[in-house]
Amino acid sequence: MDVRVYRPGELSAADRAAWTAMQAKAHLHGTPELANPFLSPEFALAVGRVRRGVRIAVVHEDGEPAAYFPYQRSATGVGRAVGLGVSDCQGLVHRPGFTWDSRELLRACGLALWEFDHLVQGQQPFEASASGTFPSPVMDVDQGYEAYLSQLRADSPKFTRSTLAKERRLGRDAGAVRYVHDERDPEALNTLMAWKSAQYRRTGRSDRFAHEWITRLVTRLFHTRSEPFAGILSVLYADGRPVAAHFGLRTERILACWFPAYDPAFAKYSPGLVLHLRMAEAAAADGIAYLDLGRGQKEYKDSLKTREIAVSEGWVTRRHPMAVGHRARRAPVRALRNTVLSRPELFEPADRILKRMGKIRSRQS
C-alpha cells in the first residue's frame, strides 16, 4: 500500500480536486454518502486550522490517488476522526472498487488506533471493528419538495398540518415571515451560536460553543466557499426579527444539518420545525438529494425523516499497548452512554435531572 501522509497545508491543489471529484461521482457508483460535506477536504482543512495533529493520508494505486483518509493524531499515536465530537460523518473517501487493510493503513499513518463515532456505511474494513451501529435520519428531496411534502402528509398528517398552521399563525401574530436560505450576515451566525449555547445550558448539556475551537471552526466554515462545498446559514425571520436559524454544510447533493436553534420566545410556533420545512424546499430547488439530520434520537427528526441511513462507532486497533489503554478508558463511557440513550426508562429520568441542573445553572449565570 503506497500511503503518503501530509499536513493540511501540504495538500496540493491537484489532490484537493481529485478528492472532490471522487465525492462528486460517489452517487454514480452506489456510495452517495461519501459525498457528505464532513468528508470533504474543506472540512478537514478547516479543522486543521483550529486543532493540532490533523493529517491527511493519500493512498496511491498505479501512481494515481485512490483514497483520502483524514484523521487527527496525538503525540502518542492515538488517532481520531477529524473533528471527533462535532463531525457527523467520518471515514475514507475512495474511488470505486478500492479495498484496503485497516491495520496496514494505521501502520502507514503511525497510528496505534483510530477512533470513530459516525463512520459512514459501506466501509467494511473499518466496520469490522465497530462496537455499534446507529440510525441517522434523512429528508429525501431528490424528487422535489412537493413530493417530500406529500410523503410527509401521508406518514405524519397531524404533524404536517400542525406545523404549516403554526407558520401561518406566526405570520399573523408576529409579522410577515421571511426565509433566507443562505444568510451571509455574520451577526445572524452570532445570534444562532448564542441561542445554541443557551439551549445547551438550559437542558443541562455541555455547551459546545464554550470551546473556542468549535466557535472558530464554525466561523471559518461560514466563510468557506468552494465548488461545491459551502457553509450554509439559514434563517427564519418574523417582521424582520430572527426567530430560528440553522448552520450546516453542503456539497453538491447533500446538506448536512448541524446546529439548529430558535428564540424561546417564539417556542409555541415551533419555528425550528417551520425552518426545516423551508430548508427542505430551498434545498430541493438547489438540486440537493437529501438533508442528513444526523445521528441521535429526537422527536423532530422522527417527524421530518423519510428514511434512515446507518453510522457506526468503534475503534480500529493495532497490537499496541497505547491502543489497549485508550480503548480500556473509552469503552465503558461509550457503552454507558449508549445504554442510557437507547432505553427510555433510563434516559427520561436522566434527561429530567440534566434539565433541572440546567435551570439552576441558567439562574446562576
Image (tube, rainbow, N blue to C red):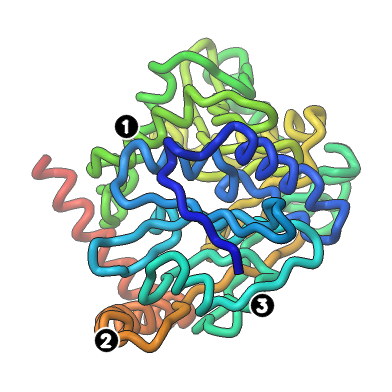
285 to the left or right of 198: right
Q: Find residue 293 and report its horizontal and vertical position in percent.
A: 61, 52
Across and down, in percent, residue 243 comes to 48, 26
Q: Viewer-nearest of labels 3 and 2?
A: 2
| In contact (CB < 8 Å): disc 1 and disc 2 | no
Real-space CA distance between mark 3 and mark 2, rounded to the nearest whole angstrom: 25 Å
Which mark's residue is nearer the viewer, 1 or 2? 2
Q: Nearer the viewer, residue 101 or 162?
A: 101
Q: Amino acid at mark 3?
A: Gln
What residue lies at 25% left-to-right and 48% top-to-bottom? 201
Mark 3 or mark 2, earlier in chain: 3
First reached walking from the N terminus: tag 1 or tag 3: 3
Give the quadrant of residue 322. Answer: bottom left
Mark seen at residue 60: none
User: Three-letter amino acid code at disc 2?
Assistant: Pro
Q: Earlier in the sequence, mark 1 or mark 2?
A: 1
How packed mark 2 is, by other alpha carbons closer than 10 Å (few <14, some 14-19, many 20 or more), is: few
The amino acid type found where label 1 is placed reads Ala
- Tell me the element at label 3: helix
How far apart are labels 1 and 2 at the CA level? 42 Å
Labels 1, 3: front one: 3
- Distance Cα–Cα, label 1 vs label 3: 40 Å
Residue located beneath label 2 in the image: 321
| Residue 142 image point, x, y percent | 85, 44
Q: Position of residue 121 (x, y in %)?
A: 67, 68
Q: Secondary structure at mark 1?
A: helix
Quarter of the picture holding the C terminus: top left
Residue bearing mark 1: 194
Callout 3–callout 2 Cβ contact below 8 Å: no
Quadrant housing the N terminus: bottom right
Please report the residue visible at 32 percent of the width from the left and 35 percent of the height from the top: 215
Q: Give the residue number, with chain letter if any, for mark 3.
A: 124
